[in-house]
Amino acid sequence: MQRFAVLQLTGCAGCEVSLLNAEEWVDQHELVYMPLVTSAYSIPEVDLLLVTGSVQTDEDLYKLRRAVRRAKKVVAVGTCAISGGVLNLGDRDEIRELFFAEESRYHLPKLLPRCRPIDTVVSVDQYLPGCPPTPELFMALLFDPPDFKIAQTVCEECDRKKHKKMRPAHLIGFQHGTVLPDICLINQGYLCIGVSTRGGCRALCTRAGQPCVGCRGASNAFIEKGSKKWFATIQRIFSKMTDIPAHEIEAALRSPQLSLFLSQFSDYASKEPQPRLKAKVL
Amino acid sequence: MVTLTFPLSRIEGHAQVVIEVEGGKVLSARFQATEVRGFQHFVQGVPAEQMPVIVPRICGVCSTAHHLASVNALENAYGVTPPPLAVKIRELLLLGQLIQNQATSLFIFTMPDTLGVKGMFERLKDPDLERVRTSITGQALKVRKAGTHLISVAGGQFIHPVKAVVGGMTSGIAPEEVAVACAELATSLPLACDLFDSYWELLVSLKKRIDTWGDDAPAYYIAATAENQPDYGSNIIRLMDPDGIEGDHFTAHEFRDHLIYEETDYSFAGKTSYRGEVMRANSLARVNLVQRMGTPRADEYLDRFREAFGRPAHELLLYDLARGIELVYALERAMEILAEPLDKDDTAVPHTPRDGEGYGLVEAPRGPLIHHYRIENGLIAKAEFVIPTVHNVMAIERALRVAAERYITPEGVNMELEQAVGRVVRAFDPCIACATH
Ligand code: SF4
Ligand code: SF4
């Protein structure tokens, strides 16, 4: 039995909700700290500390630094903790200005100059990407089952078939009425980046007809490399499968929806690049 | 002057309560939200069509409501009406979220207050209590999971759904999936009723112990729902006055004429009032506002509730009983919808994006939620999120003050105050991630 704690920094609690869905740990591990569900106000010594959310305020920074001292192993859970996630949208100078205009609030935690992934502050033993990671992935983290396998990419976990003859000439937007079943979303003109996104989610979104926006981050083939390499690969795949002009793909890849998750590349996310070793990523 | 600070737990997000006391007199009681992300700022410049995938990340607990409010706002801006099948599937999404939320709020967040434990995951020494704890927790997790599964089936993703798109839904629901979801809901319904029955009993004993159902004066009630029975996709916001008279009602784009919003300098969340009066949103508001729930088991509970507490019911702890009634309703209603064919083709209509303004409304678990976007050149020029928890902030603070006055006297502070603060706040089930967004 492991004693574990969940430290929630600035995030949406989606990661916690997913953990609650992975209910099987309840009898086998002891959850000693997670303010969402228990009234415990400090973290005791634990085997495992899961950190969700990103470092957005001085209070986050303080809590994180204190918490890791009491943990044998630290795991960054979810896109926010790993890269800042959705908060990266705020890392545009003009937007940051708007934030600081609010900063003078009395008795409140101070906002940091930019929101940060947790591994720019403390050392992290393992990463569990996903927005949020699925309950199955939480179970894999907590139990490390020997038969647990994930595919290299989302594409390999998706049942849709690629068609040689269906070559769209342009991208269609994300919000488009109906989607044809069983056919690859790229063939249908969607910017789906499941081709190079880490597997493990069982292709949740693409099965439902929504292009993958890459919340699991880069597959092992790219994770230790920069975002350029990854961009180039997506470009190559689209030029092989479609007639969509390269500049259209390039622009779409830089759109906010994807930049949420693109930021998992250290060179994209942070001025202090730290390549994340694939051995550490679940 | 003495300042008492109470950290909060078993609510969504980071907040605390600060009470100022001088010579046994309560000077102020404040509810402070201490986290912020700033969605209204950082979605500026985002292509409008990407909003339904980005905004669920405002909150992992209420993500479905944000997903749908966002799609509604875009549809309103583009002048599109989704087909009836899509409307039905969206209702399922909201019901899934309600099941998940009410089960979590009742049996994970507030149940510990009635049992006198720190949380439902804490191992207890007393073997009898431990047996009760593990059995409640196990059942509660099953019920809430039936809700998340319903969200997956209807929305494609279990927490941040993806299937609602401008014009409808990306697809219907296949009969195999319907069968699985139905079976799960059918086993969850008796579990939920059992849990709710024990909750009701425990709450009655808690009331005996603390000698109140939660003080505080009557208030206005606000919800986006139909008059006769619940409709979480209603496009009308309704109000009931403290005497139970239904009066004002308005659509999302008229909200500024009825609700007054003010910022505070001590919290990242502001507060809204109904023309200066304290109002309350969330479960109790809906249960007060509707005539009937419209499903058999839920109506039995509603009768029992009204017989005991009247209509409108005002006491704070009754929020929880209202949550239970809604949980039962949502399970029953979802099964009704799943009994209809949901795999037909006409799940969406085509649309042409255009610039302009759009308002999207849904009744989220915590009350009416409005997304308002101004779109220029296809990009978001301005986004406004009108959050249900913010409608409750004045009511929370007023109730905190009443509780503080009850337990603080010139002789000293009764230790029960800490529990009372937790109970008051949890009655409203606030969501801080949403409130500050
Ligand atoms: S990673 Fe996603 S689900 Fe987790 S806290 Fe961040 S936004 Fe929420
Ligand atoms: S399909 Fe892509 S976006 Fe969806 S859960 Fe999987 S990795 Fe995340």
Image (tube, rainbow, N blue to C red):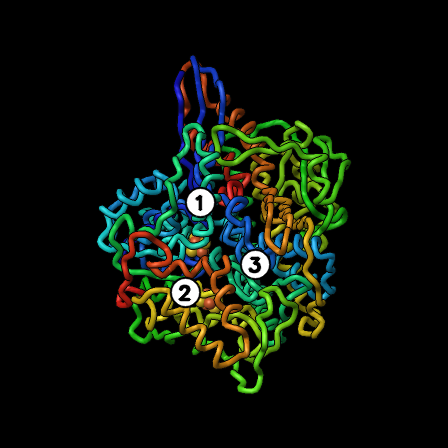
* Residue position marked by numbered label 2 in the rendering: A216
- B124 vs B216: above or below: below
Classify mark 1: residues with Cα within 10 Å, few (<14), some (14-19) or many (20+).
Answer: few
**Disc 2 crowd, CA 10 A, few/some/many (<14, 14-19, 20+):** many
Query: Is residue A70 in sight in this rendering?
Result: yes
Please report contact status of discs 1 and 2: CB closer than 8 Å, yes or no: no
Q: Nearer the viewer, mark 1 or mark 3?
A: 1
Residue A93: give its label: 1
Q: Name the one closer to the observer, A194 or B213.
A: A194
Subunit of label 2 = A
Q: Is the residue marked 2 within 8 Å of ligand 2, measured from its CB?
A: yes
Question: For the residue labelled by badge 2, is the local secondary structure a helix, a strand or a loop?
Answer: loop
**Viewer-nearest of discs 2 and 3:** 3
The answer to whether A199 is drawn above or below residue B387 in the figure is below
Label 3 element class? helix
Chain to which mark 3 belongs: B
Q: Amino acid at mark 1?
A: Asp
